Amino acid sequence: MNNKTIRLFLERIGLFALRNLVWFLFITFFFVFSVIVPAFFTLEGIHFVLYVSSCAVFLVFGQAILLISGNLDLSIAQIAGLSTILTSTLYYRWFPGQIPGFLSVIIVCLIGGLLGAFNGFLVGKLKLTSFLVTLATYFIFRWQRYYFIERTIMAKELPGIFLFSGQYEILGIKMSIFIMIVFIFLLFFLLNHIRFGKKIYAVGGGPSAATRLGINVGNTIIIAFTLSGVLAGISGMLYAGYTNAVSPDIVDGYVFLSFAGAIIGVVSMSGGRGTIGGATGGTLLIIMIDVGLMLLDMNPYIRLTLRGIFILIAILIDKSRVSLINKILLPK
Amino acid sequence: MTSPLLKMEKIHKWFERVHALKGVDLEANQGEVVALIGDNGAGKSTLMHILVGFIKPSEGNVYIDGKRVDIHSPSEARELGIEMVYQDTATISEMSVMENIFLDRELTKSFGPINILDKRKMREETVELTKNLGLNIGTPDQQAKFCSGGERQGIAISRAMYFNAKIVILDEPTAALSLKGTERVIQFIRELKKRGIVVVLVMHDVNLVYDIADRFIVLSLGQKIVDIEKEKTTLEELRKVLISS
């Protein structure tokens, strides 16, 4: 092997490691926790991390798609909560016993999609900034939850199928984990193998160039927000199954997690860059660290502080990661 | 006599009280390189933005191949074979050369009811296309951010060529380019001309386009003040017109 071959080989390894950094971190932390937390390295422990991640990952996917499109959604967790609450209210208060239970799965997605589309319309068509729009809708959607229900709706008041996906098991594995795997493939396919996915990257990577190339930027943004809303609705439904009830504050406060998972999974805040694989890795990493620290009986406030520190570290690592990748890829 | 490939007739544009274009005519025949020259605010970009469907004319008609057309959006313009290559936003940096060439018109293969991107075919076509244009970009997967200014223009021109554009508008193609980059863009323009494509060069400096253009149209304050073939004028005369306008 001559010097050039060795250099090319090392560059390929370097690129692979840098592009999959989140998974290397995941493996590292997995071993660290397996050594220091006795209950961690068990089938139950791993299953629990995957189970919690499967509910959260849909929020991260929704946020990641918007970040790739050059936008963000501060109201994403409120969309998840409000769509779950509205669906539940339909069944237990407004039309008890009148709507077939299986429709609840479609209704929650529809409401999530509509709430997302509302944000999307304001951002895509009226050209308002996504930060300000979703900051406003954060408050609107948040307080609407408490308007619709004053108490926790118990499982027996809801259609069984609504809680099914977040609760039931197949061969001892929670169904939501299978749903997560299906959606990883679906969204990967959407972003990488069909035209619409490329439009999302183009709109995020260069909105003016995309407009000049004939892409309808406004419509692309509306569809991205709608899709993100549907994913938030699914997340809310899975959390309802996870908690076996729908409380007024369901999924409240999870917006931070949606950003954390996406950013740690190296989805760019400036748009045009990021992958579904990375977002999945980011979610698994942050949930695993959370579960590990919880098993270590760490004070919850310290745990949340650590989350913030991890994000800062992730941003710093990402900055050097991108410049290292650029250095390798720069034509010599 | 055959009709010109491109004809813009008595184009007017008002932006509220500002009369930006005052009945401008423009014609171009197959394989002709037309330099649209004028100072900032002369109306060059407005005229071209009308042609690519970014803005609507207040009055006037556009004809392609003798047929009157109404162009409402850049995608409609592209369907009619009109492509515009912008100096600053010719490509999307984070996307690969291949993705940039085929953006929004990706080649697909059917998989049941779904159309899946045919990445293999697009890669092959990119290699072929860039080779024919003498564009040395490494691999089709190279991100556009690693390409020089001239190469980026080349990517945008490849896009126009692949999709059989009839008219290519280059907006200040040599601004912010090195001498080498400028030379490369001039080669691209020659290639387009050889293929019978109408090239409209939107420039404010006549020196840069004098060698390559076949005809010069000078705009000043929204009016066409000169429309002359190269054989009938000199660089010096054109300079004088521009200075006096």
Image (cartoon, coloured by chain):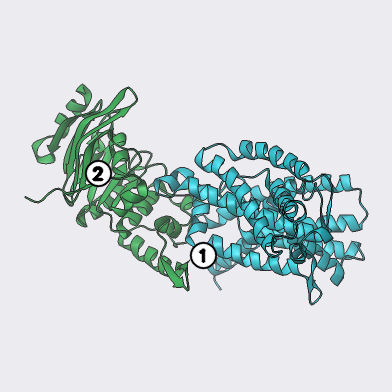
- Residue at left offset 74%, top offset 60%: A97
Of all residues, the one furthest to the bottom in this rendering is: A171
Query: What residue is drawn where x is 71% and y is 62%?
Result: A23
Identify by letter the chain in green.
Answer: B
Q: Is residue A168 above or below residue A98?
A: below
Residue, disc 2: B200
Q: Quadrant of the N terminus of chain A?
A: bottom right
Residue A78 in the image: state x and y as whole percent. 71, 46
Task: Please state which amino acid type lies under the numbered disc 1.
Answer: His
Relative to the observer, which residue lies in front, B142 or B32?
Answer: B32
Residue A12 lies left or right of residue A295; in this view the side is left
Q: Is residue A1 above or below residue B101?
A: below
Q: Nearer the viewer, mark 1 or mark 2?
A: 1
Q: Residue B47 — which label? A: none
Depth check: give the residue in front, B214 or B103: B103
For mark 1, what is the residue?
A: A193
Whether residue A194 is visible, yes or no, is yes
Res A139 quadrant in image: top right
Pointer 1 local density, CA inside 10 Å: few below 14, some 14–19, many at least 20:
some
Instruction: Judge whether residue A331 can be spotted in this image.
Output: no
Q: Which tint was used for chain A? A: cyan
Q: Residue at x 85, y 72 (%)?
A: A43
Nearer to the camera, A193 or B39:
A193
Q: Badge 2 local density, few (<14 within 10 Å), some, or many (20+)? A: many
> As shown in the figure, which amino acid type bears the numbered disc 2?
Val
Which quarter of the figure has residue A160?
A: bottom right
Check chain identity for marks 1 and 2: say if they share one: no
Image location of residue B115, percent across then percent down: 46, 67
Q: Are marks 1 and 2 in contact (CB under 8 Å)?
A: no
